Amino acid sequence: MGYRLNESAQLHNLGNVARAEKNFARARELLESSIEMARELGFKPREAGTLYSLGRIALEEGSFDDSIRYFEEALRNNKGSGGLLAIAKCLEGIAAASVGSGQYELAAILSGTCSSWRNEMSTSLDPTSPDALMIALDWLGREMGDDAYLKAWNKAKGMTLSTAVEFALRHK
């Protein structure tokens, strides 16, 4: 099992390099091979991380519904693992893709929850991610209007990551 797990990790890493180089077709090919191995081995953390990477590709390509689907599946896999940062990244991915698909309130609530959590934990956004979330949130505030945006953002303040996960997975 060990060498297959390492092979899956290397395919995942190479897929992320191809994604960073904007070679999305090659990135998908490598990531899909990685996820296939992770599923064969039953290794949920790798599966979740690879789904997240596929979601980022779909987001960068403007395939918002596909992006949400990947992020949601990654979120389901991460839910029981206790990986709070991975959960926050998935929620932020759903938030960014939700802006593109017109689900503004969902985007504002999820991004507000993650922002509050990141402030509490003194952790910043993923430096390797494109500025998609920040661009989406900037646009979101203008699109919704300040009052609606602040109202949705404030709904998030008392929401835990666990509550936000349930909210994101049932919100359609």
Image (spheres, rainbow, N blue to C red):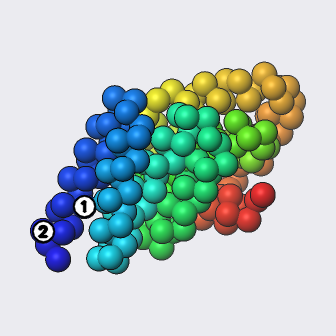
Q: The disc labelled 1 sits on which kind of residue?
A: Ser
Q: Nearer the viewer, residue 157 or 61?
A: 61
Q: Is residue 30 above or below residue 82?
A: above
Q: Residue at x 58, y 48 (%)?
A: 67
Q: Residue at x 40, y 47 (%)?
A: 28
Answer with left or right where residue 150 lies relative to residue 117. Answer: right
Asked which quadrant contains residue 165, the reply is bottom right
Residue highlighted by disc 1: 8
Q: Position of residue 133 (x, y in %)?
A: 57, 33
Work out whether mark 2 precedes mark 1 in sequence or the reverse, and give the earlier one.
Answer: 2
Q: The disc labelled 2 sits on which kind of residue?
A: Tyr
Q: Could you give the CA–CA distance between mark 2 and mark 1, rounded to whole angstroms? A: 9 Å
Q: Is residue 50 above or below residue 39?
A: above
- Residue 59 visible? The answer is yes
Residue highlighted by disc 2: 3
Answer with left or right where residue 23 lies relative to residue 154. Answer: left
- Residue 113 visible? The answer is no
**Element under label 2?**
helix
